[in-house]
Image: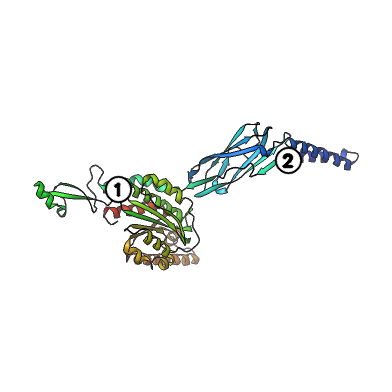
Amino acid sequence: MTWRAAALLAVGALTLPAWPAPFVGVAVMTGVVLLLCALDFGLAAPLRGLTAERDGDRSVRLGETATVTVQLHNASGRTLHAQIRDAWVPSAGAQPDVPPDRVVHVPAGDVAALPSRLTPTRRGDRPAVALTVRSLGPLGLAFRQRTGRPPTPPWTLRVLPRFDSRRHLPEKLSRLRVIDGTQVGQGRGAGTEFDTLHEYVPGDDVRSIDWRASARRAEVLVRTWRPERDRRLVCVLDTGRTSAVLLGDEPRLDASIDAALLLTALAARAGDRVDVLAADAVSRASIGGAERPAQWPRLAHALAPLQPALVETDFQLIAGELLRRHRPRSLVVLLTSLEPGALGSGLLPVLPRLAARHRVLVAAAQDPVLTALTSTPPRHPRDAYNAAAAWRTLAERDRLTAALARYDVAVVDVPAPRLAPALADTYLRLKATGRL
C-alpha cells in the first residue's frame, strides 16, 4: 500500500462525522480502499517477467568518476511503472541519474537504461549490493516489490590508487636519460657496464684509457661506461598495523603504494627487473614481471585491494621470502614506518642475513603529528608532555636509523607528500653511482 492509499483512508476518516452510522462508514470506506488496492496490485506488471543486466566501467582511479548502467528488460505483457533503486556500498559514491523516488515507465518488451555515476571515496573493490524494483499499479495505490530480483550478475568496481606522484615521472625520466647517456649534449653517466670507446679529449679520466685498443688504432681511446641495466628491484610493502596510521587524510599504506608505483614505473623505463611483495603476518600479494611497461596496469590492479591489517608485521617471514625467491643480488626497498618497536624487534634481528645478500633501502613516511608537536611551542602543561613524548620518539627513530646504517642500509625518511619523489631520487642516485 502506497501513500496514496493512506491518503484515501485519511480523507475518508475526515468524513466519518457526516455518516449516520460511523462504524458502517468505516467498514465501507476500508472495503472500498482495499478493493481498489487489490485491483491496482493485480494490474501491476509482474516482476517475474523482468530481466536485468549491467554494463559499464570495471575500474576507475580514485578521485575520478565511473559509469555503470543497469539494463532492465520488461518481458511481461504489461507496461512497467516502477521505482528502481540500484544500491552500492556507501564508499562507492553512487549517484543514479534516475532518483529512486521517480517512476520509470517501461512499455512491454522494451528496455530501460538506468545509469549510475560512481565517484568512490576509498581505494579497493566496491561491489553493487542489490537491485530493488517496485512495480506500481496504474492507480499508484499498491505495488509489487522484490530486492535482488530480477537477478543481476555481480558487479564490482575496482578503485585503483590515485597515483598523484605520476606528475614527477617526466622529470625523473629526464634525469634517467641524463644518467644513461642518451640525452643529446650530456656526457655519459657513471656506471660499471662498458658502453663505447671514443678518442681521448682533455678532461677525460685517464684511468679509463684502453691501452690495447689505443695500440691497435695508434690513437688514445677511452672507455665510457653506462649505469647497469637489467638489475633486480624488489619493492616490499608493509601492510601491518603501522600502515594503518593516518597521515593527513589517508593511511600510510596509500603513501607507500603511491611511492611504489612511481618507483616501479621509473625502474621499468630503466630496464630493471621489478617484483613487488606485500606482507604483514602473511603474504598478501606477490607481483612479478612488473619491469615491462605494459605490465604496469596489472600492478596497479593488484595493489588496489590491499588494506592495512591490524597485526604485527612478521619481518622474519618477509626476509625468508626474499632470500628464498630472490637469489641474485637485488635492491630491496622496504616501505614501512621507522617505528623503533616494530623494526627494532622485528627487522634488526634478520637484517644481517638480508643485507649480506641484497642491498636494502628503508623508506618511511613521517607522521605529521610528531612534526606538529615538536615545532609548536606548548601552551599548556599537557602540550609540554606531548612534545616531550614526540621528541623522545624522534630520538629513538634516530637511533634506529643509526643502527640500520651499520648494515649499510639507506634510509629515506620524509613527509608523506615527498616520499615518492624522494625514493625515486635515491634510486636514481644509486643507479648513477653503480651501487645497485
Q: Amino acid at mark 2?
A: Trp
**Residue occupying image coordinates x 57% and y 48%:** 90
Location of residue 340 with respect to 20 vertically, above or below: below
Q: Quadrant of the N terminus?
A: top right
Question: Mark 2: few, some, or many residues within 10 Å (few <14, many ≥20)?
Answer: few
Badge number at residue 176: 1
Using the image as rendered, state which of residue 338 and residue 45 is in the foreground: 45
Q: Which numbered mark, 2 or 1, is in the foreground of this view?
A: 1
Residue, disc 2: 3
Q: Position of residue 425 (x, y in %)?
A: 33, 52
Using the image as rendered, state which of residue 335 and residue 298 is in the foreground: 298
Using the image as rendered, state which of residue 388 and residue 41 is in the foreground: 41
Question: Mark 1: few, some, or many residues within 10 Å (few <14, many ≥20)?
Answer: many
Which mark sits nearer the N-terminus, 2 or 1?
A: 2
Q: Amino acid at mark 1?
A: Leu
Q: Quadrant of the C terminus?
A: bottom left
- Residue 418 seen in this snapshot: no
Q: Position of residue 214 (x, y in %)?
A: 11, 49
Location of residue 74 with respect to 378 vertically, above or below: above
* 151 sits to left or right of 213: right
Using the image as rendered, state which of residue 137 and residue 377 is in the foreground: 137
Location of residue 346 with respect to 170 vertically, above or below: below
- Residue 38 seen in this snapshot: yes
Q: Position of residue 180 (x, y in %)?
A: 26, 48
